[in-house]
Amino acid sequence: MQTFKLGRSELEVTGICLGSMTWGRQNTQAEAFEQIDCALDLGVNFIDTAEMYPVPPNAETAGETERCIGAWLKANPGRRDQLVLATKIAGGGLSWIREGSLISGETVKQAVDGSLKRLHTEYIDLYQLHWPNRVSPHFARHWPGMVPITQVDRARQEAEMVDILHGLEQCRAAGKIRYFGLSDDTPWGIGEYIRLSEQHDLPRPVSIQNEFSLIHAKDSPYLLESCVLNNVAYLPWSPLGGGVLTGKYRHGQVPPGSRWSINQRKGLFRDTPKTHEAIEGYLAVAERHGISLAQLALGWVYQTEGVTSTIIGATSLAQLKEDIDAYGSPLSAEVVADINAVFRQYPMPF
């Protein structure tokens, strides 16, 4: 599988990143081991997790996903250098994680130490801020009027960012993390972290992971332009729209054990009439060209200009293999044209 530089870092990552947020809830530790082994055998070298996983998050399961990965690393001590391992500090709002406190330099240091312990590793390759301290236009808050942009205290945000960067630098200097990245942030957030890192000679963000799919492509072209021109790797998460782009939720179906069968912290915000209309349009394109809906949706994300590595997740090995196989089967120009015709009808369906 092709590899790419992760922004300005020295890390080489594969075009697919193995997501892990189902491990410890929808998937057992044994199944997590199988997925890691399968992904590595198929050439994937990049794994993403977070201290709050699995999802939906709660106090009882927080940290279980990192523990699954840590158990695998403990059982495979000679393979740590084969992985680019990424994890994330939870932002404010989760009462069971540091009493719901915002991200700060001090909480970064606390969270890094906790993740290192659970992961059974001495260092984290990519340490990410799961969401910013200010309200950001993610998790269906991308419609006008939903983000209080005029109420943001810029001076406070700047002070918080500098404090966070100092915490990250202390972790980097101690050898606990190698690089840092953002998540669920905006072009302004990217620009501020770059500006402040250069102004204060502190770590510069090398990546950002945001939601991106055929039903949620608001990052193109504006945030993607910011990433490309600032050499910040773009890592799409939820390229299958929380599973809806597999077609498994068509006609009101909710398979037992699927994500939509579990109460979600943000609700089923993708479950709208327009989303389902879009799914039918994309399914017609997939059937016309003899490919699965999942392969079509993933192929479109894989081929989007500016994407570095796409974070995929699966609850079964069959799903995982299909998702990885799609990377090796690029979509033709004719298929992309048919996809784009549907996309223009449903550019923002939820």
Image (cartoon, rainbow, N blue to C red):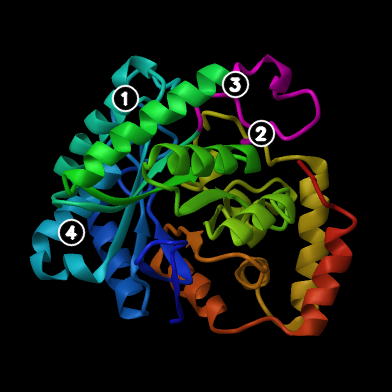
Left or right of 308: which side holds 205? left
Q: Report which residue position mark 3 lands on.
A: 154
Residue 143 is situated, as x and y percent measured from the top left of the image, at: 78, 32
**Marks 2 and 1, Cα distance to the nearest angstrom?**
26 Å
Question: Do residues under tags 4 and 2 come within 8 Å of each other at their CB atoms?
Answer: no
Pointer 1 local density, CA inside 10 Å: few below 14, some 14–19, many at least 20: few
- Type of amino acid under label 2: Pro
Whichever of labels 3 and 1 marks the residue nearer the N terminus, that label is 1
Question: Do residues under tags 3 and 2 come within 8 Å of each other at their CB atoms?
Answer: no
Residue occupying the point 13% across, 51% down: 122
**Marks 3 and 2, Cα distance to the nearest angstrom?**
17 Å
Left or right of 33: which side holds 309? right
- Disc marking residue 59: 1
Q: Nearer the viewer, mark 3 or mark 4?
A: 3
- Type of amino acid under label 3: Arg
Residue 348 is situated, as x and y percent measured from the top left of the image, at: 80, 46
Q: Nearer the viewer, mark 4 or mark 2?
A: 2
**Marks 3 and 1, Cα distance to the nearest angstrom?**
32 Å
